[in-house]
Image (tube, rainbow, N blue to C red):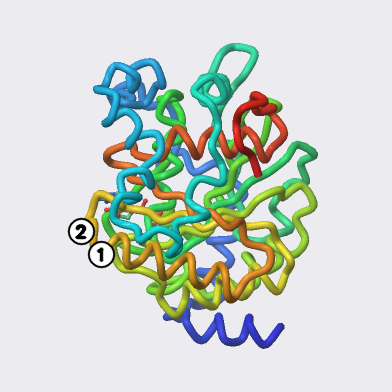
Amino acid sequence: MTELAVQFTAHLNCTSRCPSEMNVMRACSVLRPVVLLGPAPWRRAHSLASFHQASQLPKKKFQHLLFPQSALEAHLVRGAGGMNLQLFQPSDEDIARAEKLFIPSPKHKIDYSFSAVRMEHALPISQPEVCFIGRSNVGKSSLIRALFSLAPDVEVRVSKTPGHTKKMNFFTVGKAFTLVDMPGYGYKAPRDFVDMVESYLQTRRNLVRTFLLVDGSVGVQEADRVAIEMCDEFGLPFVVVLTKIDKGSKGVLLTHLLQVQEVIEKRTTCCYPQPFLVSSTQFSGIHLLRCFIAHVTGNILLTSDAKGS
Ligand SMILES: Nc1nc2c(ncn2[C@@H]2O[C@H](COP(=O)(O)OP(=O)(O)O)[C@@H](O)[C@H]2O)c(=O)[nH]1
Ligand SMILES: [Mg+2]
């Protein structure tokens, strides 16, 4: 285990589990968790889930919904940290094209695929993969649910209690890519988190981008710093996503955004310079993130006037 991994383990508040309980958990992990996942015909998409619906908003609101950082720019001192906020700037057409990937059809099925608690259970897949990691309760599952809100049959469980997701949950998006919801670290993280997540991040060949979520209402915590260092040490191309930007004041969010930018600039070499801002409840930044995922998985080429990565 690397030194970082040892440090990382120290951040986990592990609950002891008896061997038989672990065996049951492992055995269950290869089975489809029907209790949690399955058709949910009663679920309605968010009212701003589609680009078309969102485009009915007044112009400024629409702009802030697509590019939440634009609402903060007026508060940034010129030249002080704002320079990387608009690095990925797709056109409306790119965003609309990317959205098609997130809409299921008989030829393009979007579905929960399988869960795994160990790398041996993670079936090798050739299509590009993206994964979402972050502290428990940072909003991983909520974000994935928002990304998939145009596919209401995809059930992504969001819990009120921290530490719910103890497995890697794999979702397939047709033949285009797979998306993985990783177990959270920090409070109540599963004991075998390091084994599972570390080996996943180090060995998953088709992993094209790791999205590391940081709670925008609390800023970078020690466990986040360790995770950032770990991704960088592994040489993974990763992106920081600030979640829950609807919570708290603009001032607090701005402080945390500048803090994240400083960490990216001074402490990383593999991190995409622009942090993404999202609110899964208000749908801010979700359209942009869908487009970024479509772009990094090689599923869309940006129009020539757009700015890519
Ligand atoms: N206000 C707000 N709450 C959120 C947002 N995203 C998630 N939450 C809440 O944060 C809690 C943890 O979310 P969850 O997605 O389960 O986090 P996970 O443990 O990282 O998967 C839940 O109570 C969510 O309702 C958001 O964008 N805004
Ligand atoms: Mg979760």
Q: Is mark 2 within 8 Å of ligand 1?
A: no
Residue named by callout 2: 248
Tags 1 and 2 touching, CB below 8 Å = yes
Residue 120 or residue 216, whichever sits in front: 216
Corner quadrant of residue 23: bottom right
Taking 14 as reference, is 131 above or below it? above
**Front disc: 1 or 2:** 1
Please state, as top left, top right, bottom left or bottom right, where the N terminus lies in the image: bottom right
Helix, strand or loop status at disc 1 = helix
Residue 3 or residue 36, whichever sits in front: 3
Q: Residue furthest left?
A: 249
**Direction from residue 114 to residue 224 in the image, left or right:** left
Please state, as top left, top right, bottom left or bottom right, where the C terminus lies in the image: top right
Corner quadrant of residue 62: top left
What crowding class fits label 1: few (fewer than 14 Cα within 10 Å), some (14-19), or many (20 or more)? some
Residue named by callout 1: 252
Residue 228 in view here: yes
Q: Is mark 1 within 8 Å of ligand 1?
A: no
What crowding class fits label 2: few (fewer than 14 Cα within 10 Å), some (14-19), or many (20 or more)? few
Question: Which residue is drawn at the image coordinates 73% and 46% (left, top)?
Answer: 123
Helix, strand or loop status at disc 2 = loop
Question: Which residue is drawn at the image coordinates 27% and 38% (left, top)?
Answer: 282
Taking 91 as reference, is 81 above or below it? below
**Direction from residue 8 to residue 124 in the image, left or right:** right
Q: Position of residue 126 (x, y in %)?
A: 80, 39
Question: Which residue is drawn at the image coordinates 48% and 51% (left, top)?
Answer: 85
Taking 232 as reference, is 178 above or below it? above
Question: Which residue is drawn at the image coordinates 41% and 56% (left, top)?
Answer: 242
Q: Amino acid at mark 2?
A: Gly
